[in-house]
Image (cartoon, helix red, strand yellow):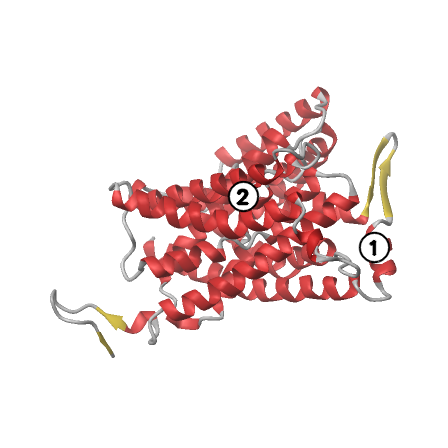
């Protein structure tokens, strides 16, 4: 069991790291295009209306919202699978494992939100974006971490992953409670019935992925029309997938691994490409110093450091958590900066918080500025904090003697 979970974790980290590099490239490409003569075609394509109708039923949305509401539901389905696996068998399966990332993640969500509110307290038109800097982009963060190679301890990667998973749980809760629209009871009832059928199938441990897939699509449509954000359908559906099917197959892991490549190398890069484009021509430093982008940038950059590092330090000193073997406080500081890369989830929440294109552009500016500085700072701090030799080659020596490198 431990070997399988370890192998799954390594496979996940490997794919997400590579996916982070692809995401970076997609975001940079969007930025370049948005500041060239091709910008009109770029933004025009994203505003193209796509209509899906059957009788009186109709979904009519621009391409950008099909990406953010549709494709991202698959991303959230994968998050749901990862959360369930981590809680049942992984880094969140016991208090000893979960205590440090839980304490760190709570600080990493609360302090950035408070910093944002402090900068936007007198800007009621911007205060709805308070949750934007609370998010962490695990693909981007692991992509940067992967550039440091085998020097990175597995325990540090696992800690970053666990913090990000808890952060995702927090983001999902925030979206459900604060960024849903006017509710339509009949659609919610339809979604609830569909979820109940999924739960029954899960309890019976069906081994085929087909019923889970089809019913998840049906529930997504109901949720889309209900006023609750459609991506939450993916999370709810994922929770019904059994760890082990009746035939003994590890169904949840199979579905998780099957989705990883699609999400890491297609869905998230498409989202990044569609949402990272912001026109920088004509911007001045004063634009970044406006309350909305500045609150986001400093919420990510300063808030994550204070929240994750500060809460982790206090938690360890109070005996609530323990520092993993071969992980030191300099590395935790570097990790807190990588966790300040908010990109995907921050942009996603920004699109939910604001309808005004000018505010959405300000969100993009703050997220990109804060994430870029955090990525560079985290990389160089970890580069100095990590051992020169690959982490796996460091072996324990008897107490009182220094470790040797084989």
| Residue 115 versus residue 401 in the image, above or below | above
Q: Nearer the viewer, mark 2 or mark 1?
A: 2
| Residue at the bottom extreme of this rendering | 406
Q: Residue at x 46, y 68 (%)?
A: 380
Name the residue at 63% across, 25% down.
193
Please tell me which residue is depicted at 62% across the width and 30% down the height of the picture.
178
On the image, the x and y values in percent for residue 113 come to 54, 39
Q: Which mark is residue 43?
A: 1
Do tag 2 and tag 1 residues touch (Cβ < 8 Å)?
Answer: no
Residue 86, above or below 175: below
Residue annotated with mark 2: 134
In front here: 197 or 291? 291
The x and y percentages for residue 295 are 60, 45
Q: Is residue 52 left or right of residue 93?
A: right
Residue positioned most to the front: 286
Element type at mark 1: helix
Q: Residues within 10 Å of mark 2 (few under 14, many from 20)?
A: many
Residue at the spot x=57%, y=51% of the render?
A: 342
**Does the rendering let one see residue 324?**
yes
**Count of picture labels:** 2
Q: Residues within 10 Å of mark 1 (few under 14, many from 20)?
A: some
């Amino acid at each position: 069991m431990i070997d399988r979970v370890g192998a799954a974790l390594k496979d996940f980290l490997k794919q997400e790291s590579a996916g982070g590099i692809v995401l970076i490239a997609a975001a940079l490409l969007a930025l370049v295009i948005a500041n060239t003569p091709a910008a009109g075609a770029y933004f025009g394509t994203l505003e193209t209306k796509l209509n899906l109708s059957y009788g009186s039923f109709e979904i009519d949305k621009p391409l950008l919202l099909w990406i953010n509401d549709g494709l991202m539901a698959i991303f959230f389905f994968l998050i749901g699978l990862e959360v369930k696996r981590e809680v049942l068998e992984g880094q969140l399966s016991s208090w000893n494992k979960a205590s440090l990332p839980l304490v760190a993640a709570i600080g990493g969500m609360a302090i950035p939100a408070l910093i944002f509110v402090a900068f936007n307290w007198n800007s009621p038109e911007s205060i709805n974006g308070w949750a934007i800097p609370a998010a962490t982009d695990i693909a981007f963060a692991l992509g940067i971490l992967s550039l440091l190679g085998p020097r990175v301890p597995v325990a540090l990667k696992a800690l970053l992953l666990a913090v990000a998973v808890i952060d995702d749980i927090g983001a999902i809760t925030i979206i459900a409670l604060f960024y849903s629209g006017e509710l339509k009871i009949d659609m919610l009832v339809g979604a609830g019935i569909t979820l109940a059928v999924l739960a029954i199938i899960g309890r019976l441990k069906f081994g085929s992925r087909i019923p889970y897939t089809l019913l998840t699509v049906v529930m997504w449509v109901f949720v889309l029309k209900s006023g609750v954000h459609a991506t939450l359908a993916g999370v709810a559906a994922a929770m019904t997938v059994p760890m082990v099917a009746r035939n003994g197959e590890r169904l949840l892991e199979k579905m998780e691994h099957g989705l990883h490549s699609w999400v890491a190398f297609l869905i998230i890069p498409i989202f990044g490409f569609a949402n990272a484009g912001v026109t920088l021509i004509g911007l001045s430093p004063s634009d970044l110093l406006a309350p909305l982008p500045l609150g986001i940038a400093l919420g990510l950059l300063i808030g994550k450091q204070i929240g994750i590092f500060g809460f982790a330090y206090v938690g360890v000193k109070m005996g609530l958590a323990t520092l993993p073997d071969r992980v030191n406080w300099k590395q935790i500081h570097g990790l807190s900066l990588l966790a300040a890369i908010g990109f995907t989830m921050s942009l996603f929440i920004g699109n939910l918080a604001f309808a005004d294109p000018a505010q959405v552009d300000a969100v993009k500016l703050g997220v990109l500025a804060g994430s870029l500085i955090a990525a560079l700072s985290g990389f160089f701090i970890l580069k100095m904090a990590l051992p020169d030799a690959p982490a796996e080659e460091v072996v324990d020596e008897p107490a009182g003697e220094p470790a040797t490198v084989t």
